[in-house]
Amino acid sequence: MAKDRVIDLSQLYDASKNPRQWEFHQAPEKYKLYGGAYGGGKTACITNEGIALSIQYPGNRGFIGCREAKAFRDNALKQLEKFLPAELIATHHKTEGFFQLVNGSVIMYGGLGE
């Protein structure tokens, strides 16, 4: 990936269509929480925040998880694979549970109870 290449994440995810997600992404706080009812877009919102931070800060290390590993595999991992552009992925270490991105960032994933 060229350094000057622009990755447009809005082709797969457009937070401007959901005011709560948009507000979350625009919040200046270092630590942010996002909650809500089933189907409210929490996974899409958090996943895309992690992807954006991993693009913005080369060498970033982040973790996306759920309470249980099975819940992560059944839902959140599918969202992560859907939204993470293939051209950003250097390698996907499925057994260890992380993506190594071409800019040196790492997105780790899994269950919190492990």
Image: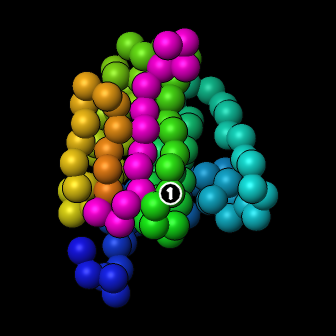
**Where is residue 29, by image quadrant?**
bottom right
Up-down: is 93 above or below 20? above
Say if residue 85 shows up in the picture.
Answer: no
Q: Nearer the viewer, residue 111 or 102?
A: 102
- Indicate left or right for 104 with 86 as reference: right
Does the stretch in magenta take in 72?
A: no
Q: Which span of residues is magenta-colored? A: 102-114
Q: Nearer the viewer, residue 9 or 110?
A: 110
Q: Nearer the viewer, residue 103 or 20?
A: 103
Instruction: Find disc 1 in the rendering and name its residue.
Output: 60
Up-down: is 22 above or below 91? below
Amino acid type indicated by mark 1:
Asn
Q: Residue at x 69, y 58 (%)?
A: 23
Q: Residue at x 48, y 20 (%)?
A: 111
Residue 2 horizontal/vertical position (percent): 26, 81
Up-down: is 82 above or below 40? below
Q: Furthest residue to the bottom?
A: 4
Residue 40 horizontal/vertical position (percent): 56, 35
Under circle 1, the secondary element is loop
Dot 1: within a 10 Å radius of its alpha carbon, few (fewer than 14), some, or many (20 or more) residues? some
Up-down: is 62 above or below 70? below
Q: Residue at x 36, y 72 (%)?
A: 8
Q: Residue at x 76, y 64 (%)?
A: 28
Residue 15 horizontal/vertical position (percent): 52, 58
Q: Quadrant of the N terminus?
A: bottom left
Say if residue 3 shows up in the picture.
Answer: yes
Residue 70 horizontal/vertical position (percent): 38, 13
